[in-house]
Amino acid sequence: MTINITEEGNTITAAFDGRLDTIAAQQISETIEPLLQHADRNIILDCGKMPFISSSGLRIFLKIRKEVAAKGGKVYLKDICPDVQQVFKMTKLDDLFETIG
């Protein structure tokens, strides 16, 4: 799992590449710090190259969403594959995230 974080104006995009399983979630916890520090902005979580998300991965997304909600930013999910989208629906987390693309 790799994450490429880019900034453009008031938007930060985190592009996830690979499976966000339990091991990857533990490894990327420090990588997401820029997202948490700038949670007052628009944050796009680009899932176009993420074929799988575990419960640990969902916790990472919820942590980002919680910080963004507290600081007044907005978080969006982009390009979710059907398998990952199904996980969000089954856990009813699809109601917490706005999707784009």
Image (cartoon, rainbow, N blue to C red):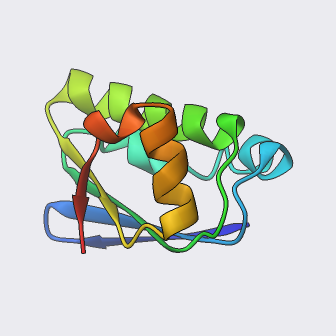
Residue located 25% across and 58% down the image = 99
Out of 86 and 20, give the one closest to the viewer.
Answer: 86
Out of 71 and 24, give the one closest to the viewer.
Answer: 24
Decide if residue 71 is on the left or right side of residue 16: left
Q: Residue 30's image quarter?
A: top right
Residue 33 at least partly seen? no
Decide if residue 1 is on the left or right side of residue 101: right
Of all residues, the one furthest to the top in this rendering is: 70
Decide if residue 24 is on the left or right side of residue 3: right
Vertical placement of 56 versus 76: above or below?
A: above
Residue located 58% across and 31% down the image = 59
State the image coordinates of residue 16 (x, y, percent, origin top left): 56, 68
Residue located 30% across and 62% down the image = 12
Q: Residue 36's image quarter?
A: top left
Residue located 85% across and 47% down the image = 23
State the image coordinates of residue 39 (x, y, percent, origin top left): 29, 40
Vertical placement of 44 versus 25: above or below?
A: below
